[in-house]
Amino acid sequence: MTQVAQQVEPPQRATPLQVAKAVLSAFIGIRKGAAHERDAVTITPVQAIAAGIIGAAIFVLSLVMLVRYITS
């Protein structure tokens, strides 16, 4: 009895644009189930953490710039 080994290809890593879209939709709070399932397979934790930190920094800096513009 021989078993045929099935080769399962690992999912492709998400592109930076896909990661940015996933993080932006997480910030806003809108997410579709199918997109969440796809992103859960393709986005690595390192990609999600890096994109979240960058997104949060951009958000905070834009708020600081807006407040400085309004108060000047």
Image: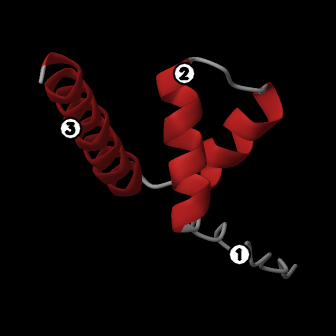
Among the 4 quarters of the image, the one containing residue 9: bottom right
Of mark 1 and mark 3, the one earlier in the sequence is 1
Of the residues shown, which amino acid type is indicated by label 2?
A: Ile
Of mark 2 and mark 1, the one earlier in the sequence is 1
Can you say whether 37 is above or below 66 in the image? below
Front-most of 33 and 66? 66
Front-most of 7 and 70? 70
Can you say whether 41 is above or below 14 in the image? above
Q: Residue at x 58, y 42 (%)?
A: 22
Of the residues shown, which amino acid type is indicated by label 3?
A: Leu
Label 1: state its secondary structure.
loop
Residue to which mark 2 is pinned: 28
For the residues labelled 3 and 2, the Cα–Cα distance comes to 17 Å
Of the residues shown, which amino acid type is indicated by label 1?
A: Glu
Of mark 3 and mark 2, the one earlier in the sequence is 2
Within 10 angstroms of label 3, few (less than 14), some, or many (20 or more) residues? Answer: few
Quadrant of the snapshot with the C terminus: top left
Q: Which residue is drawn at 64% across and 70% down?
A: 10
Q: Where is residue 45 drawn, in percent x and y?
A: 38, 49
Label 3: state its secondary structure.
helix
Q: Residue 61 carries which label?
A: 3
Residue to which mark 1 is pinned: 9
For the residues labelled 1 and 3, the Cα–Cα distance comes to 41 Å
Front-most of 34 and 27? 27
- Horizontally, residue 48 falls left or right of residue 2, namely left
Quadrant of the snapshot with the N terminus: bottom right
Front-most of 57 and 19? 57
